């Protein structure tokens, strides 16, 4: 296990460094942030002075070396736009994204698993086929369109739920979260559903395939022969055995849900990290973009690791293999 | 949470007929198209920040809807000689912490402006003319300038005043110099963002500033002027246009700025909503390369830059059917432009005195032939595609019109962050862009877009085409030293006419900015495109 962890760590550091170089020079090449940020009324002398203050007048490699020097001391720089530490800025947006991803994940499991198991159980009947056809929509409809449609139906026409923004928040463990307040939760339902739709379809398909396969296994036949009820077979024996691929996929999807909920957060004006990222790209706020993507790499590494650990809990055989290496 | 989902089709059908939600009388929710990057009034000199600070931190001078100056913290002002302006300040104003407002607060504010840490765009643009202050009594402020400076009152409308006393500074002891005021204690930008330093004289107090989420303002109970109509204002950054309009229709906000053109018909048709629109101070123009030979994006001219020939420039201008662009692409929500500032604003010609160039394709072809290009030439038109209303579509229309007269035109469209860097690097032979006259008068576009590029004088900062006309520069310079309003206005008009008759730049149209709101409230459109909560009122 230790060797495995160390190897993982070395790979991660390499990915982080590569990411830093690519993103830094990529954003550098797009354009000069001052051209976007400074007031059009500023005189050429003021523009030059601001460039010097931010160090933009230096050659790219010098700017990069300075950035790396600071990064090694744990300072990823200050946002050009907000004047705050990039990491602090990202962390201040993080709770909103995390809670949205958590609710989205809950929705995708709560919708996807029952539908998938049922579709697998009734694979050759119309119910199973209807669910599978329906899941194609979940895959193919673009996120922003689904978001707008949900707003139109539930906020504009029915007026059951608020259209955009974030509701009331309560302080939990030093983070402002809205998932624990009734008003706040209302604001989360539509964006979380939008986020969950694609994942729910994915989970439905995985659960169906798993269930179909599991139903042909000997232990199911044996259970049936023993007279165990169909409900118990599905909910206890089958469900337990189909969860591993679902958790693998959801783990990966959770990462993308946290890091790249850009479209959903933009449509719903949700003040999360995705919105921060897109705003930062539009204003060429390089420290925030670089810090964000580095943080994304770290999140993915962390999630993959957690998924590995969960495997071992769900399937004793995985633990043996892990220790053997 | 209300359990909504399973109420049946009947309810769905009923609910489709939109219920009228009563406007709770004292709260106002506004959906903004862009967000302030900070709550610090001096951190970032850009529209959304300047708009936000006006509710909390007032300036000495105010602008009305047409950007004409009016009294605010200063009751009156006048030049007392060539180098000095006197401002007579109100005596009944208190900051929200109870400390009285006086001239020393102004000096303290001007001292802070050049030194705001990490600021991406300082307000020094508007304070650099100040050479010294004199305070004969606490409510009289005399400002020294280097020579006559007619724009000083305008510039005093651009920055909000913060309190010296609230920050533990004895204003009378400040030793002002344009290069710095010594070591004074200033609030940090962060202190404005967490509202602890949000101590101003404005109609609202800032209750919270949550980036990306909301800004909450509450009425200032001790405001010196007429109290705001709203107890509580929530400003929501709804940056995508579709959801912003949806939020208005759903009743989640009371007013939105910049609803997209394609939604205006639907909003107008809804009797529970109101749409207002007014001409803005922003002109959309095409700038031409007057300097480089050969010009980077011109083809088939054997290395000559045809844009240096006035006949070619005139041909390109009259080849454009501005009325068609306004009608078809801008949906009628724009006004064809004959110069760089719309009629009615200071220094612009009266309606009809300098009309837009009339469309005349035949004459354009004849001019091209006369200039030696009977078969035209090739050019690429640079344009942003996400900065101005329908910018790329307008460029496409212009390209077709130019191609019609034989100037084969391609489009090079890019996102704003790329476009402006390339523009400033003089990569384009012709480019479309816009200019909003921050000061609301003609010297702003002339100085930035058409005055000869001169780093030391601060002229021609956005003149990427490097147009240069010394005669016009002289008239403009004279205008900038003429304090008498009527004389200055005439000089500005003269300078503008000189540039337009030289076809220095091709003005296309003035943007018209719309606001949409519930029918129960009203807002007067503003040329500066600001959405100011204290100007929103209940409908009559």
Image (cartoon, coloured by chain):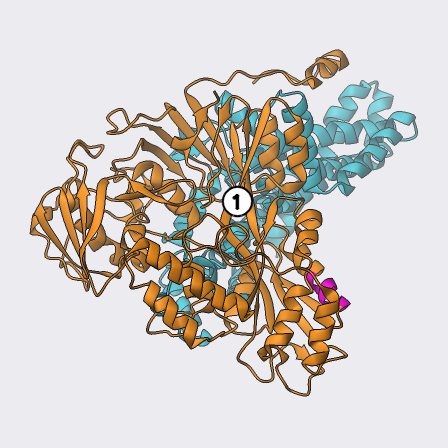
Chain colours: A cyan, B orange
Q: Residues within 10 Å of mark 1 (few under 14, many from 20)?
A: many
Relative depth, front residue between B538 and B316:
B316
Could you say which quadrant of the image residue B121 lies in?
A: bottom left
Instruction: Look at the numbered disc 1 and give the secondary structure of its residue.
Output: strand
- Magenta segment boundaries in residue numbering: B398-404
Is A166 situated above or below A315? above
Q: Chain of mark 1?
A: B
Residue B335, image x, y percentages: 59, 49
Q: Name the main secondary structure of what is drawn in magenta.
A: helix
Dividing the image into 4 quarters, which one contains the N terminus of chain B?
A: top right
Residue B524, image x, y percentages: 47, 34
Q: Which residue is mark 1?
A: B279
Residue B58, image x, y percentages: 29, 40
What residue occupies the far bottom of the structure in this picture? Answer: B302
| Residue A244 visible, this orientation | no
Residue at 70 percent of width and 52 percent of height: B324
Residue at 67 percent of width and 44 percent of height: B331
Quick check: is A122 in the magenta stretch?
A: no
Is B325 situated above or below B477? above
Residue B255, image x, y percentages: 51, 31
Residue at 65 percent of width and 50 percent of height: B326
Residue at 68 percent of width and 16 percent of height: B15
Quick check: is B400 in the magenta stretch?
A: yes
Relative depth, front residue between B255 and B239:
B255
| Residue B13 visible, this orientation | yes
Is B147 situated above or below A261? below
Could you say which quadrant of the image residue B309 lies in?
A: bottom right
């Amino acid at each position: 296990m230790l060797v495995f962890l160390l190897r993982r760590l070395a790979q991660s550091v390499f990915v982080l460094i590569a990411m830093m170089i690519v993103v830094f020079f990529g954003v550098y090449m797009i354009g000069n942030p001052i051209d976007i940020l400074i007031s059009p009324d500023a005189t050429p002398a003021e523009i030059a002075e601001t460039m010097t203050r931010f160090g933009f007048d230096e050659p790219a490699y010098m700017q990069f070396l300075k950035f790396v020097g600071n990064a090694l001391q744990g300072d990823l720089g200050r946002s050009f736009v907000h004047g705050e530490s990039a990491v602090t800025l990202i962390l201040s947006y993080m709770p909103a994204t995390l809670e949205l991803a958590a609710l989205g994940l809950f929705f995708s499991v709560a919708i996807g698993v029952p539908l998938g198991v049922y579709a697998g159980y009734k694979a050759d009947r119309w119910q199973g086929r209807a669910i599978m056809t329906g899941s194609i929509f979940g895959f193919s409809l673009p996120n922003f369109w689904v978001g707008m449609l949900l707003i139109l139906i539930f906020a504009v026409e029915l007026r059951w739920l608020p259209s955009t923004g974030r509701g009331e928040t309560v302080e939990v463990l030093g983070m402002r979260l809205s998932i624990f307040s009734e008003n706040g939760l209302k604001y989360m339902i539509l964006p979380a559903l939008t986020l969950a739709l694609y994942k729910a379809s994915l989970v439905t398909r995985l659960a169906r395939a798993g269930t179909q396969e599991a139903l042909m296994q000997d232990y199911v036949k044996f259970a049936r022969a023993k007279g165990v009820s169909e409900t118990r077979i599905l909910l206890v024996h089958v469900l337990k055995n189909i969860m591993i691929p679902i958790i693998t996929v959801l783990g990966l999807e959770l990462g993308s849900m946290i890091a790249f909920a850009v479209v959903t957060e933009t449509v719903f004006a949700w003040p999360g990290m995705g919105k921060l990222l897109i705003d930062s790209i539009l204003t060429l706020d390089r420290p925030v973009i670089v810090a964000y993507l580095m943080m994304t790499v770290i999140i993915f590494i962390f999630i993959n690791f957690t998924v590995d650990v969960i495997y071992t809990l769900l399937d004793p055989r995985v633990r043996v293999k892990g220790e053997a290496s | 949470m209300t359990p909504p989902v399973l109420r049946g089709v009947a309810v769905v059908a009923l609910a489709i007929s939109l219920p009228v939600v009563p406007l709770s009388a004292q709260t106002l929710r506004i959906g903004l198209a862009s967000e302030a990057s900070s709550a610090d009034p001096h951190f970032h000199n850009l529209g959304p920040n300047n708009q936000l600070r006006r509710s909390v931190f007032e300036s000495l001078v105010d602008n009305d809807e047409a950007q004409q100056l009016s009294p605010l913290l200063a009751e009156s002002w006048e030049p007392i000689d060539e180098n000095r302006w006197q401002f007579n300040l109100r005596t009944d104003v208190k900051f929200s912490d109870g400390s009285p407002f006086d001239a020393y607060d102004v000096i303290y504010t001007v001292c802070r402006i050049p030194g705001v840490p990490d600021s991406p765009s300082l307000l020094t643009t508007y304070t650099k003319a100040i050479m010294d202050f004199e305070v004969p009594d606490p409510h009289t402020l005399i400002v020294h300038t280097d020579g006559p400076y007619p724009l000083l009152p305008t510039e005093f409308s651009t920055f909000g005043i913060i309190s010296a006393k609230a920050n533990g500074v004895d204003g009378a002891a400040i030793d002002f110099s344009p290069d710095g005021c010594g070591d004074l204690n200033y609030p940090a930008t962060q202190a404005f963002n967490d509202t602890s330093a949000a101590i101003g004289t404005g109609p609202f107090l800032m209750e919270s500033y949550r980036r990306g989420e909301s800004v909450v303002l509450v009425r200032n109970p001790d405001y010196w002027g007429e109290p705001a109509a709203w107890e509580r204002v929530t400003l929501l950054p709804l940056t995508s246009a579709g959801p912003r309009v949806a939020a208005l229709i759903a009743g989640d906000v009371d007013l939105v700025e910049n609803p997209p053109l394609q939604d205006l018909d639907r909003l107008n048709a809804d009797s529970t909503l109101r749409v207002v629109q007014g001409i803005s101070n922003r002109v959309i123009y095409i700038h031409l390369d007057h300097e480089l030979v050969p010009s980077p994006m011109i083809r088939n001219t054997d290395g000559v830059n045809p844009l240096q020939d006035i006949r070619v420039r005139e041909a390109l201008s009259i080849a454009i059917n501005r009325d068609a662009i306004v009608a078809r692409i801008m949906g009628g929500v724009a006004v064809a432009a004959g110069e760089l500032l719309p009629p009615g604003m200071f220094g612009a010609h009266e309606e009809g005195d300098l009309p837009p160039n009339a469309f005349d394709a035949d004459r354009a072809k004849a001019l091209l032939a006369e200039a030696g290009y009977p078969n035209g030439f090739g050019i690429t038109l640079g344009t942003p595609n996400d900065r101005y209303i329908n910018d790329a579509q307008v460029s496409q229309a212009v390209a077709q019109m130019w191609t019609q007269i034989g100037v084969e035109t391609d489009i090079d469209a890019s996102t704003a962050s790329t476009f402006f860097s390339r523009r400033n690097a003089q990569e384009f032979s012709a480019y479309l862009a816009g200019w909003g006259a921050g000061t609301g008068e003609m010297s702003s576009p002339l100085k930035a877009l058409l005055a000869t590029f001169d780093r030391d004088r601060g002229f021609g900062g956005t003149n990427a085409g490097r147009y240069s006309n010394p005669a016009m520069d002289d008239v403009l310079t004279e205008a900038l030293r003429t304090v008498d309003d009527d004389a200055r206005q005439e000089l500005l008009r003269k300078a503008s006419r000189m540039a337009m008759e030289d076809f220095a730049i091709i003005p296309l149209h003035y943007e018209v900015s719309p606001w949409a709101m519930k029918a129960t409230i009203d807002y007067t459109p503003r040329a500066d495109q600001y959405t100011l909560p204290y100007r929103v009122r209940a409908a009559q």
